[in-house]
Image (cartoon, helix red, strand yellow):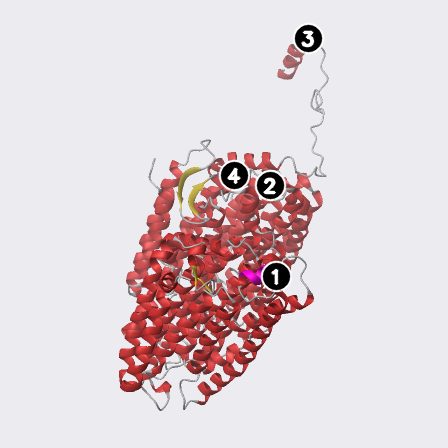
């Protein structure tokens, strides 16, 4: 693969697809979009299979000086690789999800999604600070249009809120970036990750970056744009929001805040913990009382992302790995849950939970998939959710048992609201005739659900495939953080093991054989 | 004094003056029937004058060789850069005019006005003098030539009350501002004993007296009026709304460039030794312009009025570069100015294409509802300009904000920059309202008319520059702006 600029190629394909979609009719645009995203996915597989685990930290690097202050610097490590894989995996599914539900301005819709994909890949692959910012921020334009043009009734309010919240967050980050580049005299991200900024300045820089990423994650109390945007966005828009866009915040923390400002991260960890603890409990309780399915899943996203932030700021390997797996898992599971909502929304055009009931009777396959994703969201062992949440909470337990205690209630509450949702939608009697008459999932919907289900199970049963590429990078990050890591209150000290097990029968020297004989008799 | 050398330096102005005088005669005898022809001739003259700038701009011009008429004018790279931008804007204002004057919106006197191109030409001459002034006398001369032609241009639709009102308001307030400026100049003359920039600068060295400080403040206030910076901005929305749209497009570009360039030259070349005296004032004006320009725009329904507030907002960012008070800041300011001019021309060209079946121009939000369905090309172009004005990457407007803020932060004005950039989010609110109205609302269906090729070319060109292809220009643009900014700081 030497010399082939595969990352640029992965961005070029959807860009060309987007341009073609803009100028073609509805049906052609659908097929072009599907083709382009599938090609990108194949390129993604090529990328993953050529990624050398244990090789250099930054692979597939491309570098070309552009103009004043910018350079086209791309390159990925294991963390970026996994997140790129997540977005290229979800994108064809998004296109399929909007195959029939989007009927107006199809060409522009498909173009917006593909531009979104270009920007996502660019954000994860950028190795230049300003290039990262350009990709990070440019996503606002297509997302604003997706929510505003193809969204639900209250779409205008939601689109404004989304746009202004995220813009406000990121402009402060831009100011911090200028300062960093002026100070370190480089905009190269790998170099900056090793640069030691003065501790005093780190405090402010960390806050500026936090303003941006906390909105994206989103952390309580900056999360209010998310339920609005999710509910009003079309199904595929929700999938992209939950599956990929929210991960930008987590990626930002792991790529910028933690390695670039380790001291400030330790200093502000209490803030992250406090906000995350509130988010886990509060948003879970809010989710419990929702009557709108999408809103419920949106609030559950906030709770799950709080587990991510808790894991990230645990300052140890388990926490970081757990946070990454929760991000990947949540990307798959919440995307799948939104698809599940989309499937029945397409049939009945309502998201009111009370309008459904007993779907397991007339839509058995649908109920099966829905159950699997519900369980994955709760964190049932064997699904991806378990692996991530367990690692995250194990990590945070070493740092603060209180935070671990409060965060773990999120799992219980999660089970409460998800099972409650599932009972009302899939079990019970068929209260509404129109809901009872709905057909089971079609071949197209199979094609959307089955790959996600397979990935969820794969990640749950054999997470090593996903952990292996990230291991070296997370170890490097952990080493970078070690000097600033808080002591932790769990005091996990290896004890002095007894010589024998507690229930061992006392033996005398030279009587082993005799004892064995006695046992055999 | 070597007049031949001086005349060679002001050759572009001579070309424009000559062309203006000849075309005035043509207008006098040919009447409005010759209007279109005069416009073409004027555009050619401007193009020729612009072409004359190229060699000097290419090699760079600094030092004593750039002084003309015994130090009254200074044709350095900075002046050349500003002039090139002014001529380009003036050409654009000429290109978009005929279609407007032919439409029913021009009132009872339809048809291209013969005076319009001539006034634009004289205004351009005035602006050329402004940006190359190196003496307060020349400065005032150029400023008044520009202002007087502008008053007439604002009121060019004689039978239209809005146009007349705009002209009158502009004249009264403009005259007041000129008075303030002149008073400031007289104070400076009194306390320093000279009108030449170098003489005033020398007189201001050391501890500055209260009288001289007042002179500085009065001069800055007068100039702030001309660039419509807060708190001297009140005239802008009224004049922009009332004046005919091509004239508004002209006002928001060429005179802005000239006034900003003039302000930069005055603060650096005259007050350059007393940075502490003016830096706070400029910082205040920058922040106030950004915030009030954004807040004022929120409730507006008329698009021209909205763009007026947008121009106030943009002046704030331009002044941000000025407030940095070093060569990087000045260079960033020039880059911003160029990109701002491109975005303004594009936005106004798009505005002039919002025509009904009979050619009537529409200019409120209610009229452009659902424009993306009825006229998708115009809607997409406007979308690009609005996101670009809001500074969203990867559009070119982001780059202009990028350089200005980079200069601010590198100079250590972190808190100042942070407040300014946070305030820029307020501005984003009304820019995305444009997009909301055009893309999210149901079509109003009034904008159905066709537009001429001239508008399409202008719109396409500016849209391509904004759609990030303009980044390809940035290396040479930055290079030019650096050279131009450097020539401001050559004064010992």
Label 1, residues with CA under 10 Å away: few <14, some 14-19, many ≥20: some
Q: Earlier in the sequence, mark 3 or mark 4?
A: 4
Q: Nearer the viewer, residue A514 or B425?
A: B425
Q: Earlier in the sequence, mark 3 or mark 2?
A: 2
Q: What secondary structure is the magenta-colored segment mainly?
A: helix
Q: Which residues are magenta?
A: B198-203
Asked if badge 2 and badge 4 are on a common chain, one would say yes
In the displayed structure, A8 sits above or below A511; it is below
* Residue underneath mark 4: A191
- For the residues labelled 3 and 2, the Cα–Cα distance comes to 48 Å
* Residue underneath mark 3: A510
- For the residues labelled 1 and 3, the Cα–Cα distance comes to 110 Å
Which percent across, then down, holds residue A361?
46, 60
In the displayed structure, A434 sits above or below A469; it is below
Label 3 lies in what chain?
A
Q: Nearer the viewer, residue A383 or B394?
A: B394
Q: Nearer the viewer, residue A347 or A44?
A: A44
Label 1 lies in what chain?
B
* Residue underneath mark 2: A319
Q: Nearer the viewer, residue A357 or B459?
A: B459
In the displayed structure, A339 sits above or below B232; it is above
- Please check the rendered image and state whether residue A502 is part of the magenta-colored stretch, yes or no: no
């Amino acid at each position: 693969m030497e010399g082939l600029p595969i990352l640029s190629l992965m961005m070029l394909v959807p860009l060309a697809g987007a341009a073609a979609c803009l100028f073609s009719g509805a049906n052609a645009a659908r097929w072009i979009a599907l083709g382009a995203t599938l090609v990108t996915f194949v390129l993604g597989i090529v990328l993953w299979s050529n990624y050398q685990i244990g090789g250099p930290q930054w692979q597939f690097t491309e570098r070309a000086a552009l103009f004043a202050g910018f350079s086209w610097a791309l390159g990925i490590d294991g963390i970026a690789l996994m997140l790129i894989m997540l977005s290229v995996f979800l994108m064809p599914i998004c296109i399929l999800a909007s195959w029939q539900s989007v009927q107006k301005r199809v060409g522009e819709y498909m173009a917006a999604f593909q531009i979104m994909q270009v920007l996502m890949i660019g954000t994860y692959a950028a190795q230049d600070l300003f290039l990262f910012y350009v990709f990070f921020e440019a996503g606002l334009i297509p997302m604003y249009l997706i929510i505003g043009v193809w969204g639900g009734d209250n779409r205008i309010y939601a689109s404004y809120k989304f746009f202004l919240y995220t813009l406000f967050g990121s402009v402060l980050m831009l100011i911090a970036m200028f300062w960093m580049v002026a100070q370190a005299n480089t905009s190269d991200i790998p170099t900056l990750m090793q640069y030691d900024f003065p501790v005093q300045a780190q405090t402010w820089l960390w806050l500026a970056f936090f303003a941006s990423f906390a909105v994206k994650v989103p952390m309580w109390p900056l999360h209010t744009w998310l339920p609005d945007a999710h509910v009003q966005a079309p199904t595929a828009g929700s999938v992209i929001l939950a599956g990929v866009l929210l991960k930008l915040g987590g990626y930002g923390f792991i790529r910028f805040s933690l390695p670039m400002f380790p001291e400030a991260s330790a200093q502000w960890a209490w803030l992250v913990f406090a906000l995350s603890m509130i988010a886990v409990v509060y948003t879970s309780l809010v989710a419990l009382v929702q009557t709108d399915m999408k809103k419920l899943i949106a609030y559950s996203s906030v709770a799950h992302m709080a587990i991510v932030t808790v894991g990230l700021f645990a300052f140890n390997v388990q926490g970081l790995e757990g946070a990454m797996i929760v991000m990947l898992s949540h990307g798959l599971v919440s995307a799948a849950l939104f698809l599940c909502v989309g499937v029945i929304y397409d049939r009945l055009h309502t998201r009111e939970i009370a309008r459904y009931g007993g779907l397991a009777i007339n839509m058995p396959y649908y109920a099966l998939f829905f159950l699997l994703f519900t369980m994955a969201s709760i964190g049932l062992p064997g699904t991806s959710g378990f692996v991530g949440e367990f690692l995250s909470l194990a990590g945070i337990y070493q740092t603060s048992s209180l935070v671990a205690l409060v965060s773990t209630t999120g799992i219980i509450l999660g089970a409460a609201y998800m099972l409650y949702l599932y009972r009302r939608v899939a079990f019970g009697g068929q209260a509404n005739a129109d809901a009872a008459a709905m057909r089971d999932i079609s071949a197209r919907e199979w094609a959307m659900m089955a790959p996600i289900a397979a990935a969820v199970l794969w990640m749950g049963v054999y997470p090593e495939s996903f952990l292996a590429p990230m291991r070296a990078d997370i170890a490097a990050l952990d080493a970078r953080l070690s000097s600033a890591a808080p002591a932790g209150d769990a005091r996990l000290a290896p004890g002095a093991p007894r010589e024998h097990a507690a229930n061992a029968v006392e033996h005398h020297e030279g009587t082993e054989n005799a004892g064995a004989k006695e046992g055999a008799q | 004094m070597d007049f031949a050398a001086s005349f060679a330096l002001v050759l572009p102005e001579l070309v424009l003056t000559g062309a203006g005088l000849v075309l005035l005669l043509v207008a006098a005898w040919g009447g409005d029937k010759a209007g279109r022809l005069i416009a073409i001739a004027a555009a050619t003259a401007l193009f020729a004058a612009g072409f004359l700038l190229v060699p000097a701009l290419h090699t760079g011009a600094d030092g004593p060789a750039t002084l003309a008429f015994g130090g009254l004018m200074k044709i350095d790279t900075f002046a050349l850069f500003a002039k090139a931008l002014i001529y380009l804007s003036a050409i654009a204002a000429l290109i978009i005019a005929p279609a407007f004057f032919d439409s029913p919106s021009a009132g009872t006197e339809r048809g291209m006005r013969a005076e319009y191109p001539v006034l634009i030409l004289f205004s351009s001459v005035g602006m050329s003098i402004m940006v190359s002034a190196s003496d307060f006398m020349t400065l005032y001369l150029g400023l008044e030539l520009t202002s007087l032609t502008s008053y007439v241009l604002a009121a060019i639709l004689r039978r239209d009350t809005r146009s007349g009102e705009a002209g009158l308001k502009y004249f009264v307030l403009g005259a007041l501002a000129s008075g303030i400026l002149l008073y400031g100049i007289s104070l400076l003359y009194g306390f320093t004993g000279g009108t030449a920039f170098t003489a005033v600068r020398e007189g201001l060295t050391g501890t500055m007296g209260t009288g001289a400080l007042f002179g500085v403040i009065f001069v800055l206030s007068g100039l702030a009026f001309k660039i419509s910076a807060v708190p001297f901005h009140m005239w802008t929305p009224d004049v922009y709304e009332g004046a005919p749209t091509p004239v508004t497009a002209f006002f928001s570009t060429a005179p802005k460039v000239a006034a900003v360039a003039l302000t930069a030259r005055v603060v650096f070349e005259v007050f350059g030794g007393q940075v502490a005296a003016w830096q706070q004032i400029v910082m205040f004006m920058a922040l106030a312009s950004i915030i009030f320009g954004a807040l004022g725009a929120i409730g507006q329904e008329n698009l021209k009025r909205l763009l007026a507030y947008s121009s106030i907002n943009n002046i704030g960012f331009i002044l941000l570069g000025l407030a940095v008070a070093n060569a990087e800041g000045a260079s960033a300011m020039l880059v911003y100015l160029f990109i701002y001019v491109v975005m303004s021309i594009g936005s106004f060209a798009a505005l002039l294409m919002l025509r009904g079946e009979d050619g009537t121009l529409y200019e409120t939000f209610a009229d452009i509802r659902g424009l993306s369905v009825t006229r998708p090309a115009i809607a997409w172009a406007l979308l690009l300009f609005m996101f670009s004005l809001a500074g969203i990457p990867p559009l070119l407007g982001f780059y202009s904000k990028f350089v200005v803020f980079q200069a601010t932060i590198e100079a250590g004005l972190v808190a100042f920059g942070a407040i300014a950039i946070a305030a820029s989010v307020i501005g984003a609110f009304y820019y995305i309202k444009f997009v909301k109205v055009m893309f999210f609302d149901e079509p109003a269906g009034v904008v159905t008319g066709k537009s001429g090729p001239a508008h399409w070319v202008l719109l396409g060109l500016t849209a391509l520059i904004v759609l990030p292809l303009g980044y390809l220009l940035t290396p040479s643009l930055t290079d030019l702006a650096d050279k131009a900014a450097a020539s401001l700081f050559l004064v010992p």
